[in-house]
């Protein structure tokens, strides 16, 4: 079996979970000479990055075409060896490799007629709690509390909410409003559900603000605070960790093992966000996870794009004890609910190990791919 075609497909789509903003992903479709197809994705997010990654995938396809998908680790290494100069410490090259690598794992599973999770060695969890992972949009805290109760009615075991996002919620910018929001959400969902707050890029807390805000949130027993000081601030995170109780989550902007090693060395991160569509694919993801598991820290899949990254993320999440839950977007959206014939979901708030279908275990609707193909 030989790979005969590598096709990057940049897509643009409206995301209801992000106030219908247009978001961008670069998918890749890899085909073998006997007609098997594997799908990968990189979470490029912006339109100019999408076209650049598509060009990189086209260029790197010379390391993929003519090879067998069973040689996926070898192909991963060959591509890393190629981009040593322009991909040092990550960047767009890591996106290109991420998409290719995910598609190769999908193909390898299909070629061997077994699931990605089985290829990774099988599940170590019987089931994982599902939570809703959304953004706050509404100007009214009461309306957002009602919405949160609606999300909980699906059975999910908690929620993570983004502050500083599009829409009218205006959260992350005013102490009293933020604390009132957390208080009201805790009341609305009850004491037993998980509640996490995730600071968006628009929020720029200094260290003192972060300490004051998180100390106030501590009264409402939040499960973690995500990126309160952005992607990299070792001294600030140390101060915050010394003065507050809640777990600190960050890491989702890192590209590879070296980036996660640097955060681990600071001793300031409790929950590491990791995105297979960014961190050099499933192969890179598992390398990072093994380090986090060894350090006895928590890992959490950043799977907030298409069902391709979600399927890869669920498989890796079930392969390591470092993962404690899985996030689903609360509102139906094109890249999760239309892209695949059977959308990924939870059952009464639990996710179960995906071992019954080959590869990623998803079937792509190519009409939907073509509908959102970026012009
Ligand atoms: Mg996040």
Image: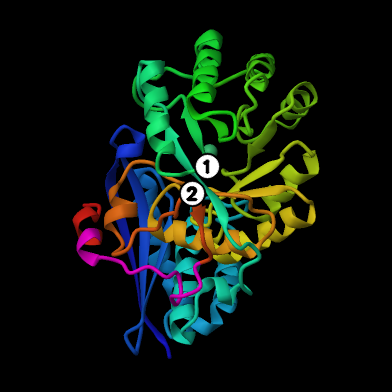
Q: Are marks 1 and 2 in contact (CB under 8 Å)?
A: yes
Query: Few, some or many C-alpha atoms within 10 Å of disc 2 (few <14, some 14-19, many ≥20)?
Result: many
Colour approach in the figure: rainbow
- The residue where tag 1 is placed is 157
Q: What percent of the width, then of the height, locates residue 98?
A: 50, 61
Label drawn at residue 260 = none
Start-end of magenta stretch: 354-368
Determine if the C-beta at disc 1 is less than 8 A from ligand 1: no
Q: Main secondary structure of the magenta part?
A: loop
Q: What percent of the width, then of the height, locates residue 273?
A: 60, 45
- For the point 50% across and 57% down, which residue is it? 351
Q: CA distance from mark 1 to mark 2?
A: 6 Å
Q: Is residue 144 magenta?
A: no
- For the point 59% across and 78% down, which residue is it? 74
Which secondary structure lies at badge 1? loop
Q: What percent of the width, then of the height, locates residue 128?
A: 57, 54
- For the point 67% across and 57% down, which residue is it? 288
Query: Few, some or many C-alpha atoms within 10 Å of disc 1 (few <14, some 14-19, many ≥20)?
Result: many
Residue 200 as seen in the image, left or right of residue 244: left
Which secondary structure lies at badge 2? loop
Residue 243 as seen in the image, left or right of residue 10: right
- The residue where tag 2 is placed is 349
Decide which of 153, 30 is in the foreground and name it.
153
Q: How many marks?
A: 2
Residue 84 visible in the displayed image: no
Residue 156 as seen in the image, left or right of residue 225: left
Which image quadrant for residue 119? bottom right
């Amino acid at each position: 079996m030989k790979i005969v075609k590598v096709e990057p497909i940049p897509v643009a789509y409206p995301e209801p979970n992000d106030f219908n903003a247009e978001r961008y992903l670069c998918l890749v479709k890899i085909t073998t000479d006997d007609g098997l197809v594997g799908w990968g994705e990189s979470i490029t997010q912006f339109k100019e990055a999408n076209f650049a990654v598509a060009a990189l995938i086209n260029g790197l396809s010379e390391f993929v075409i003519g090879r067998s998908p069973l040689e996926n680790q070898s192909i991963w290494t060959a591509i890393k060896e190629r981009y040593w100069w322009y991909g040092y410490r990550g960047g767009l090259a890591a996106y290109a490799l991420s998409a290719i690598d995910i598609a190769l794992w999908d193909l390898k599973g299909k070629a061997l007629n077994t699931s990605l999770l089985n290829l990774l060695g099988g599940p170590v969890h019987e089931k994982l709690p599902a939570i809703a992972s959304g953004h706050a949009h509404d100007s009214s805290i009461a309306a957002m509390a009602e919405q949160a109760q609606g999300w909980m009615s699906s059975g999910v075991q908690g929620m993570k909410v983004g502050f500083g996002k599009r829409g009218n919620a205006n959260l992350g910018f005013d102490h009293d409003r933020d604390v009132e929001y957390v208080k009201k959400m805790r009341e609305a969902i009850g004491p037993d559900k998980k509640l996490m707050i995730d600071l968006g890029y628009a929020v720029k807390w200094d260290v003192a603000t972060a300490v004051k805000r998180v100390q106030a949130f501590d009264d409402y027993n939040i499960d973690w605070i995500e990126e309160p000081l952005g992607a990299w601030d070792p001294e600030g995170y140390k101060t915050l960790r010394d003065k507050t109780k809640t777990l600190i989550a960050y890491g989702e902007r890192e590209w590879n093992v070296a980036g996660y090693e640097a955060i681990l060395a600071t001793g300031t991160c409790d929950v590491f966000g990791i995105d297979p569509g960014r961190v050099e694919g499933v192969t890179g993801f598992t390398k990072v996870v093994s380090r986090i598991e060894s350090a006895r820290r928590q890992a959490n899949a950043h799977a907030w794009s298409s069902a391709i990254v979600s399927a890869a993320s669920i498989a890796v999440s079930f392969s390591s004890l470092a993962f404690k839950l899985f996030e689903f977007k609360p509102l139906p959206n094109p890249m999760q609910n239309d892209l695949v014939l059977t959308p990924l979901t939870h059952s009464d708030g639990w996710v179960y190990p995906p071992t019954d279908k080959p590869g990623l275990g998803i079937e792509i609707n190519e009409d939907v791919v073509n509908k959102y193909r970026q012009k």
